[in-house]
Image: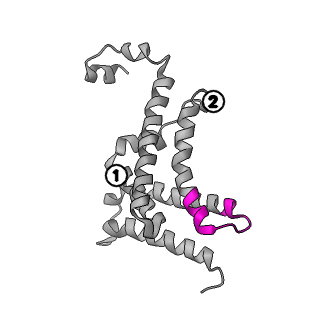
Amino acid sequence: MRDVARKLNISHQAPYRHFPNRDHLLAEIMRRCFVDFAEYLDSETKAHQEDELRGMGEAYMTYASSKPLEYRLMFGTPWPDPAAHPELIQHAVHAFDLLRQTLLKKLGKVTGAKKQAELEAMFIWSTLHGMATIEQSNVMKHLVLTKGVETQAREFNMKMIGAALSALENPHKK
């Protein structure tokens, strides 16, 4: 807090006039990041109506690379107590719900659709999160990869997600 206050040219105690403690301040900053993230995913998904999932995946990766500090704060920081910060949880869940609802639309009203949509959402989210984290850490630059792998990895992951979801739709197709 002292470093932040120094950079803002304010007293390190000034934020505590508005927030009872560090966790409340952190929760509010994280909540605002999740609002921004969800709005970005929502707008980009609507812009890709021909393939909403693809648009959402591209938006996720673009957000992570264009706002690395916010992304790391949301997904790399231990969260304050959820019971004390329901607004944070509400907005974080909203971002996940965008993906879940898109998948539910795709699945329709089949038996077990909600569970299937949630499993697919976790698969997509964890794959994108892994790729975003790897890109942010610059680890690929140290892996001595074949030429083109680093620049094609994101697109390859998107195609693999699509292939995996297609395989689930057509389990008997080889």
* Residue on which the image places disc 1: 65
The amino acid on which the numbered mark 2 sits, given as a three-letter code, is Ala
Q: Quadrant of the C terminus?
A: bottom right
At mark 2, the secondary structure is: helix
Image height check: is 11 above or below 69?
A: above
- Residue 157 or residue 82, whichever sits in front: 82
Dots 2 and 1: beta carbons under 8 Å? Answer: no
Region rendered in magenta = 101-116
Q: Earlier in the sequence, mark 2 or mark 1?
A: 1
Disc 1 crowd rating (10 Å Cα; few below 14, some 14-19, many 20+) is some
Separation (CA) of disc 2 from disc 1 = 30 Å
- Residue 68 or residue 101, whichever sits in front: 101
| Location of residue 120 in the rendering, given as x and y in whole percent from the top left corner | 59, 63
Q: Quadrant of the N terminus?
A: top left
Numbered circle sitting on residue 83:
2
The type of colouring in the image is one colour
Count of marks overlaid on the render: 2
| Location of residue 126 in the rendering, given as x and y in whole percent from the top left corner | 53, 56
Asked if the stretch drawn in magenta spans residue 79, the answer is no
Q: Main secondary structure of the magenta part?
A: helix
**Which quarter of the figure has residue 145?**
bottom left
